[in-house]
Image (cartoon, helix red, strand yellow):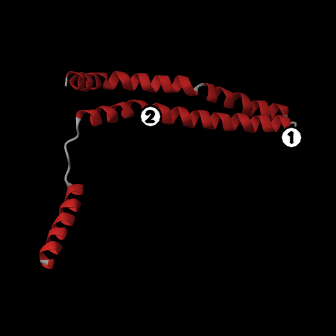
Amino acid sequence: MNDCNAAAQDQKRAESIRRQYIRREDNKIDKLRRLDSKVKAPGKITASVLGVVGALVMGAGMAQVMVWGNMAPGLALGIPGLAAALLAYPVYALITNARKKKYAAEIMRLSGDLMRE
């Protein structure tokens, strides 16, 4: 009887491990979420990096001016940094809109299928 329980538990463990390696069919909502992420993520990442780098460069320029009193080098750093930080959102919108056009048909098809169900 004890051997029977051990064998049953081993079978359950084996089945549990096996399920992890079986490729399951993705459902439509998972596909739709992945596509939506594929549209938005590149623009978010690019804009975030641009905004952070721009803010850091602008901050370095401000430090040059306020701490060390170097007006010309400070402005030479600060103004381009400000421009880079201000361009973050337009860059996000540009990238995201281009990717929306690329994936729009498939997203509309999947969302239409889901709304009909």
Nearer the camera: disc 2 or disc 1: 2
Residue on which the image places disc 1: 68
Label 2 CA crowd tier, 10 Å (few <14, some 14–19, many 20+): some
Task: Please identify the residue farthest to the front as the structure is shown.
Answer: 1
The picture places residue 35, in percent across and down from the top left corner, at 33, 32
Which of the two residues, 89 or 65, is positioned nearer the viewer here?
Answer: 89
Does residue 86 appear to the left or right of 74 in the view shown? left
Which of the two residues, 111 or 71, is positioned nearer the viewer here?
Answer: 111
Question: Residue 15 occupies which quadrant of the picture?
Answer: bottom left
Residue on which the image places disc 2: 42
Disc 2 secondary structure class: helix
What residue lies at 61% left-to-right and 37% top-to-bottom?
Answer: 52
User: Would you place residue 116 above or below residue 63 in this image?
Assistant: above
The picture places residue 42, in percent across and down from the top left corner, at 44, 34
User: Would you place residue 71 above or below residue 21 in this image?
Assistant: above
- Alpha carbons under labels 2 and 1: distance apart: 38 Å
User: Would you place residue 7 above or below residue 61 in this image?
Assistant: below
**Dots 2, 1 in contact, CB < 8 A:** no
Question: Residue 90 occupies which quadrant of the picture?
Answer: top right
Task: Please identify the residue farthest to the bottom as the structure is shown.
Answer: 2
The picture places residue 92, in percent across and down from the top left corner, at 50, 27
Q: Which mark is residue 100?
A: none
User: Would you place residue 74 above or below residue 14 in this image?
Assistant: above
The amino acid type found where label 1 is placed reads Trp
What residue lies at 21% left-to-right and 65% top-to-bottom?
Answer: 13
The amino acid type found where label 2 is placed reads Pro
Quarter of the figure that contains the N terminus: bottom left
Quarter of the figure that contains the C terminus: top left
The picture places residue 63, in percent across and down from the top left corner, at 79, 38
Disc 1 secondary structure class: loop
What residue lies at 60% left-to-right and 33% top-to-bottom?
Answer: 51
Does residue 25 appear to the left or right of 30 in the view shown? left
